[in-house]
């Protein structure tokens, strides 16, 4: 089985974190490939940055998906996920959606630990659009500047752990999600140090993508995730255009 | 006052409908300019098409906004609206948001009349993300093929009126929204023929954009609509890049 | 265009604030008239006081609406608004509804700043009945006695501004609503001093009433805002009775 | 124990129905008095008619409550109930609230059977404002003209029973509420003829009012149902004014 | 009238508290019998303990219900209530459901005061399953070890009262529910000492059970509370088996 | 890896279906064991039957869990799942929860196809308690008698497929869940015959249980899924009692 993980941002250091955690998490026989967006921003905190990441993810998916069994949008917030699910003939998931699926199987109330104050409003909107609003205990986030996005988890591990503990004690969290590709792998290294189960997006997405491939649930031919109806288009990059073609 | 209406799709015929209704709706002294997306699809029915329209709208906004007092994303579903509100220094609204604001002032339960079956799921998600889910009585849509997107309202006016009547009788609608730029002007021509108030997106967006300019409510410096924090970026078109610059 | 603003309370000093802000906000050519309730209380903080204001507003509307193009119920909480919308043949809005419509066009999460602790429960119920519960970030209120209802904004401007800042910092507000007719004009004088957009009810209601008149959306003949069905009645003041007559 | 039931409408025939069912329902030793509004409409179907009924109920309550242990607002929709609860020193309930309390103790999903199509929107708003929206299976209503409000249940008993049966079969109702004072007593006469438990407002309100008197839960001194803060007022009928006096 | 109150836990001291408050609360002529679970835990704080209590309550109900007019599941959280309502031919209620019904008749926003931190999550789930989530202002709980479950209210009365006061002041509670059979009678002894109405589960359940018997609303023959369809079963205790028999 | 699937009902024929589908679904190296409840009913349609199944599942889990890496409650509705999650030291999931997790990764709106009319109300409550209410498009069910619970899918495959198609066409389903252990394997045999992705509970639960074991997210020491606090208990079967022991 071959999985494509698309980092919709330009940070190679984050792609390295994603790759390492994905490889540690994958079942035997699963091959992992991680691609980094050729254009965009370093990481996503806002709706506008997500718009950019979604477009970059769509281009990478359009160009590369044919070699893979499933695709993962490897940024928390899942930029472009719903859109790609319409046009890709293979399963696709994202870090938020996958982490929420794991958390849903481990407890009722979920807290998300994030890397910046600004990111919280956007995360909340994504979780609510996922239909998980009623299960969100809280979002808590670092409130200090990040010197390097690839080193967040090294520099702030204790602060992130403290946020998780407060989410359990004060917000009633049953499960912790460590959010964002820059935190890939931190759940693994905090194992046994937190009072409730803890999950991250990358390991969840890899495992759930494998499950979707195994379940062979079928592709939508009707409903809102069927391919878009054919209609005139113009001026699109060929990778995007290929996703609109119905063969 | 100068308003920029961005058609995030490639259909010049729809841009003409938008321009006509916008000019009829504007207050004296308001100048209207409508721009058509240089790339994309003919009209938006799905999440993927919306992703494309959002990126096109961002490029047009980045290139042209400096000459205007406010911007309108002139497609129902408001592709890119939340993102543009973060980066533009002037008010911005969209057809869905504006039509809902009008409808909110006219009654409690709102039905949306749309041009295709497929479009309904995406519209529902947009309305719910707007926070108007509890007020949505129904979405009803044409179920026949559209021969030409610019001629929908001419060819299907009676069918659209009949859908509105059923929404009142069977779904308890207090207000009707005729949805989609291709229906721009239809509310005006159906005046007096429907049993409840009826609004459309273009006239609502023009009027509400004027109101936002007049109210001078101020730009967000904090909160989730402040400009995105500065961070590294790469490879973006200059129109997009200009929206990330903080001057 | 002639707008009638009904102060459903007996405070002439508040009517003066309403009139000043309404005149500053109106488009050229709009005439403003403000009427003060002949009976009732000084300002509304509770459901019972709102019941009194609603009845007074209905009497004033019944007596005077024929000279106007639209009516505004000029108290936050909009006493009697839904009822008047059924019986008046012209558009009618209220300060809460109109402020929420403006705020909806400026951001997602809305905080309301109010003049007394007691008023908060009633405001919350009104906002929820409007369907805006999911968008309410918080209600924050002064906690000191008010020496004079007409002088609240002069005496407490700094405290009100501080409440707004806390709503942004602690509650995640994207937009601030300064609530209550006694604060009419304060949004204007705080322009540029708050970190997010700020709106008030009077300017919003005037502008949105103008929009409703311009849109000519039509009067409800069916649905829940059509005039009440004819039935026996008895003993009503003539101004009220005139609203039940179907001509 | 003495209970005051206030018919906020002018129909003596409905007051007779209320009195009969109240007397049949009351515990031994409970005295029932029913007062009919001196002004208003024959029965309430809309928000405006409810506004009138609320004001009439407030006047009757202000004038008479001192002789009673509890008050019932005896119209479905409970006009003025929340307001009266603030100002009366004794328990007060209403037909909707009381019927919902009974239904809540008998099953999960509740359907309401009503006497007119028009009444449904207003009932729905009342039920939602009560916080019972999630438990409402449906509202179903007669769709024929009512020749006499006091004779509705006699003339339409079979049609009402058929609506209840459809609510069970098609809407998943666990409990039926026969709504409106004009249906007082119908639940009793349909006993054993419906496939699920059935309740009405008058018998529920009488029993629950007795319970509130027995429980002696105490009057609100703080919170949103404490008496309104003292403030200037003017021009109010003495019965209303007496409710604002804090002794 | 004879009421059976089932303590689904093994604590005789709590059964004594239940019996005393039930007898004080009952109308003249109502006979009270309290049975204690022969197996289970001392009191319920979690879902697993509730599962045990539900099974014990079902056995007691199956064995004894034939001598009674109504049954009360006398633990907060109402273990087994929905299940018993399907199989018992007489009305059945529980402490949570009954306390919420009382509170619903006294105000809008309800706070629950509980005896342990751990119990809060389970209570919240029960209240939300009841459909009362939107009306829950807060749950506040003791945070100290309980030396003896039968003596909680004696030892912690002041702490419980302080929690109630904070719920009013900080959470906007209109009504207080003192939760849990171990607090039976405390509402009565705190009468007049709290700033808002206060109710408990035992007195509410007794009164509402009497009301259900009086209303004679009928037993469900269809809908989700009709007896379970006949089907094979095996190995059940005879008391349980008797509840599956349809005579 | 060893998985224990507990059929909380007494039907060996259903256990055979569960075992077959579980073995087909498991990853290489996963061992499957299915245990059938020694007491209870043939299958669960109601809350009372679920109460019995929950108690049986708890006994089997208490007796056998020590030999396994994870436990699956193998009935739709997941009787006892939340309770077992508190007391078992290994991951535990159920058919409903697992099917919803799969469906969540495949689309937005989910329809459930069930085997009897009666079962629907209980399923709806379980889905809502899971927090998936907003994503439920519909529940549709067979309306004919079942001659043998083990042969439902053979006898009714076409009717079940037709229900799924109507859910897509009329209810807007993006994903179909074939609900109930008696339908185990039907999703597999309908592959490619439905217009949207289709999942079942058994294959989902097996795959997700494997994922939970692989993720090693940690056991709850705090929060609402930590083991119940130690307290007196009495008269419990030893298998149950062992689950209360904290070692």
Image (tube, coloured by chain):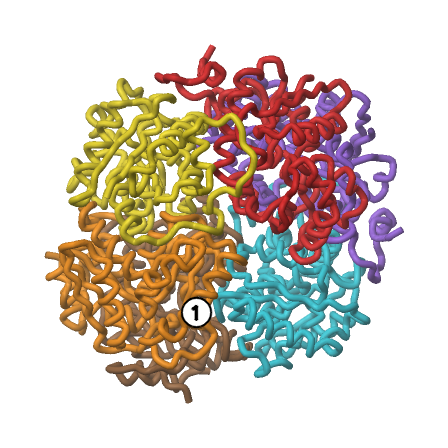
Chain colours: A yellow, B red, C purple, D cyan, E brown, F orange
The residue depicted at 38 percent of the width and 17 percent of the height is B235
Foreground residue, E91 or D6? E91
The answer for which chain carries disc 1 is: F
- Relative to E221, is D163 on the left or the right? right
Label tally: 1
In this view of the protein, can residue E100 be seen by the observer?
A: yes
The residue depicted at 34 percent of the width and 42 percent of the height is A93
**Crowd class of label 1 (few under 14; some 14 to 19; many from 20; radius 10 Å):** few
Q: x, y percentage for residue B14?
A: 66, 31
Residue extending farthest right: C247
The residue depicted at 65 percent of the width and 55 percent of the height is B171
Q: Secondary structure at mark 1?
A: helix
Q: x, y percentage for residue D26?
A: 60, 75
Q: Does residue B20 lie above or below B232 as drawn?
A: below
In this view of the protein, can residue D241 be seen by the observer?
A: no
Q: Does residue F157 lie above or below A51 as drawn?
A: below
Q: Quadrant of the N terminus of chain F?
A: bottom left
The residue depicted at 35 percent of the width and 29 percent of the height is A8
Which residue position is annotated with label 1? F158
Q: x, y percentage for residue E55?
A: 29, 73
- Relative to A120, is C178 on the left or the right? right
Q: Does residue E125 lie above or below A139 as drawn?
A: below
Foreground residue, C177 or A34? A34
Residue C203, quarter of picture: top right
- Relative to C37, is D210 on the left or the right? left
Residue extending farthest front: A247
Q: x, y percentage for residue C65?
A: 83, 39
């Amino acid at each position: 089985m071959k999985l494509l993980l698309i980092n919709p941002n330009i940070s190679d250091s984050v792609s390295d974190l994603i790759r390492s955690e994905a490889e540690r998490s994958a079942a035997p026989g699963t091959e992992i490939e991680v691609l980094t967006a050729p254009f965009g921003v370093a990481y996503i905190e806002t709706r506008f940055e997500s718009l950019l990441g979604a477009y970059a993810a769509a281009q990478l998916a359009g160009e590369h998906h044919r070699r893979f069994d499933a695709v993962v949008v490897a940024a928390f917030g899942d930029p472009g996920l719903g859109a790609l699910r319409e046009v890709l003939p293979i399963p696709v998931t994202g870090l938020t959606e996958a982490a929420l699926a794991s958390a849903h199987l481990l407890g009722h109330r979920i807290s998300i630990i994030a890397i910046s104050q600004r990111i919280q409003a956007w995360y909340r909107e994504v979780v609510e659009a996922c239909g998980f609003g009623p299960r969100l205990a809280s979002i808590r986030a670092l409130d200090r500047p990040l010197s390097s996005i690839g080193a967040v988890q090294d520099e702030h591990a204790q602060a992130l752990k403290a946020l998780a503990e407060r989410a359990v004690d004060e917000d009633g969290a049953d499960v912790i999600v460590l959010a964002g590709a820059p935190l890939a792998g931190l759940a693994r290294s905090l194992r046994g140090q937190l009072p409730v189960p803890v999950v991250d997006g990358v390991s969840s997405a890899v495992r759930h993508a494998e499950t979707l491939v195994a379940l062979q649930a079928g592709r939508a031919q009707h409903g809102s995730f069927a391919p878009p109806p054919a209609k005139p288009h113009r001026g699109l990059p060929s990778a995007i255009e290929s996703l609109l073609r119905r063969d």
